[in-house]
Amino acid sequence: MIPGGIYSSKSEAQPVEDDSPKALPVLGELSNSDNDINEPAFIWGISDKAAQRKTISVDEGLFHLQQEKQQKQQQRPEPVHRLGRGKGRLKLPHRLLFKNRHFTCSKIIGRRFACFAQRLSHRRKQSHCDLLNESTGQLPTTCSSSASNNLNWNCRVKMTQQMQNLHLSQSKKHSAPSSPNAAKRLYRNLSEKLKGSHSSFDEAYFRTRTDRLSLRKTSVNFQGNEAVFEAVEQQDIDAVQLLLDQYTPEELDLNTPNSEGLTPLDIAIMTNNVPIARILLRTGARESPHFVSLESRAMHLNTLVQEAQERVSELSAQVENEGFSLDNTEKEKQLKAWEWRYRLYRRMKTGFEHARAPEVPTNICLAVTSSTSLTVSFQEPLSVNAAVVTRYKVEWSISKDFCPLAGEIIMENLQTLRCTITGLTTGQQYFVQVSAYNMKGWGPAQTTTPACASPSNWKDYDDREPRHKGQSEVLEGLLQQVRALHQHYSCRESSKLQTTGRKQSVSRSLKHLFHSSNKFVKTLKRGLYIAVIFYYKDNMLVTNEDQIPIVEIDDSHTSSITQDFLWFTKLSCMWEDIRWLRQSVPISMSSSTVLQTRQKMLAATAQLQNLLGTHNLGRVYYEPIKDRHGNILIVTIREVEMLYSFFNGKWMQISKLQSQRKSLSTPEEPTALDILLITIQDILSYHKRSHQRLSPGLYLGYLKLCSSVDQIKVLVTQKLPNILCHVKIRENNNISKEEWEWIQKLSGSESMESVDHTSDCPMQLFFYELQMAVKALLKQINIPLQQARNFRLYTQEVLEMGHNVSFLLLLPASDDVCTAPGQNNPYTPHSGFLNLPLQMFELGIVACFT
């Protein structure tokens, strides 16, 4: 086997396909593949009888050239001497007789074949260097200059593929069009990627992150840009989506026009490819800036069609005049590419001529989003023959006829069809209209529903001051005093450490030799304990003895620790100040157990922090775990970002920990530690759900309390334990002045369920949304609509939680808001609800919305 795919045997010589592995082309080779006519796969892939006859003639010529020039080759080297090794392989077992003219032709073909072999060897060396340069992220250079000097087939050294692409991106003038073969290579590579195989496309563009970053700066921009053009022109939506998923619009250079002055979006909309055009618009694609008017677009398309037609005619004439040769084969390939390009331009021109201006947008809604802003939402026009809409225009005015205009906004980012108008005057009435634009121009404008609105907020209803006004300033003053005391303590402690630091360190190091630092509890005896759960995915932190980190607080606690537990939950907001709190809380020697228990809690917390080597112990579980043996476990939970290394601990899978645990109690009376291991998945699920935040919008919440001797609990769902039972009313979280005024009148006149939502009132849409929300909420908490006859809305204020989340409260009858101990609850919800302590509920809201 020699380069080119010639196989020699004793009986015959015939061309076969080369079995050497060839890497599929990368993106940078797609658009210029029509120039690569010297590739062996292209030359020897021609299954033609003439090629077979040419091979036999070459063998004959080489056989006689070997005899005639044997002495001349010993005196001086010829360019043909590189085929010395191959001529032996190509020898025929017998001499073929031929005439002198045939011999002369064979000598010429033999010289050309020798040059071809030399050129093929040079190309393979250069391809190897290109691969090495691609792996280092550099532009490829010529591997050998001496090899190119011996080539007399072509009198120039061909530029490498990336250098041609770089030259194309810089010049952008008179470039040859991409051929259909390049598009076929693109789809072959992308289809291999979509099927999950490992092709050269994967190796070049889906490598490890380090290799991709080294290649992006030099090749991704123009290679990715050409790949997007090929995919859009061939209307391959899967290839377009794959490229947009793998790279950003900046990396793909999505909005830079090509040498014809077109962007991928221009081709998509002028060929009326609506799906691809919408995908490109959602990723931020823009039209070409060259099209400033309809006339300029039409003139540009006519020029492209005319140039392509002239080029096709010129190449057709050249192909007909010349005979069979490699140069003619290249021209035939270029002819096919220009014919394909001509059909594409004709299709784009036809699409532009038959398109018309867009119709009006649909479902245009106007909403009051604050005291100084309005929001307009709409949908695409219901047009069939119009072109794809590429931008929208929102106009507003204080006059009904929109003269004069107060302002306008051109929307080119069509990821969401929503526009917020800011900087408006509170209480001023504004009219708003929206119009659409495509390549044929602007369509007619359509007014919103309602036609006008006034920016306002529910606080503007009676100009009353907020109920919590001044409280934030008082709290800030208290915090400043605490910070000042804390700083004074820190300075005093640091000075003490500087004077006696070395003496204490020596004594502690000596004590460390005789006392074990690991004081985790292995088995529970009657007492109060703290258990820490650090988890990452399915792994959990355990001690070196494969136990959950637990320390003892007190071995002689009282049966009721509700208030002490609620006090301990507040420590989760200030884990870093435990040492300062231990010095600030005095040690009580009296008979009162409150201060003693809390001092022991601080000491146990500090011990856990020292053993684990971290201050942050996480959030406290909403209730302690108790058993019949008198053990009480307070559990803290923390999710870590990765598998950190902790002092006196290691990581273990939760399932493995549960299977290895040997219970020391009976199933009828499990210990608190056994209960913790059994319910650990539920505890982790609660912790994950308690960090979830609601999406922006206006919600209707149900407030239901139940009280006991020592605490008050609130009804929440297990899915979102940090939020009241709720349903969403709408996306807009703002309550306008008119809507709040209507709610005040509604609550004072009649009940919610007796009002007909079809009545003629200015707040008809808002009332309909509110009534649907009430019905859905009552169904969620298992309350029939007839029993909700005395339910009412909380009309003192709108609960603004933060992050654009607002709540309206639905309350039961005044006597049923809070169920007393021993009182039957007439409203029994379905399963999936929790009665959460009120303090834990408040901490959950603070942690989630602040």
Image: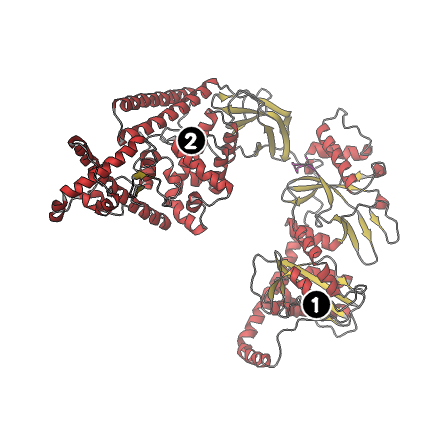
Q: Amino acid at mark 1?
A: Met
Q: Which is nearer the N-term, disc 1 or disc 2?
A: 2
Give the residues drawn in magenta, as a range.
728-735
Q: Amino acid at mark 2?
A: Thr
- Residue placed under numbered mark 1 in the picture: 601
- The label shown at residue 263 is 2
In the image, farthest residue toward the front: 94
Q: How many marks?
A: 2
Q: In screen coordinates, is 152 left or right of 205?
A: left
Measure the C-alpha gap from mark 1 to mark 2. 67 Å
Q: Nearer the viewer, residue 247 or 818?
A: 247
Q: Where is residue 318, by image quadrant? A: top left
Callout 1: helix, strand or loop?
helix
Q: Quadrant of the N terminus?
A: top left
295 lies above or below 678: above
- The label shown at residue 295 is none
644 lies above or below 192: below
Q: Name the magenta segment's main secondary structure.
A: loop
Q: Nearer the viewer, residue 182 or 497?
A: 182
Does the image show residue 383?
yes
Q: In screen coordinates, is 399 left or right of 281?
A: right
Q: In screen coordinates, is 328 left or right of 509?
A: left
Q: Position of residue 190 (x, y in %)?
A: 46, 39
Please name the residue shown 72% across and 36% down the image.
462
Q: Position of residue 549 (x, y in %)?
A: 66, 67
Q: Nearer the viewer, residue 688 or 211?
A: 211
| Residue 518 forms part of the magenta stretch | no
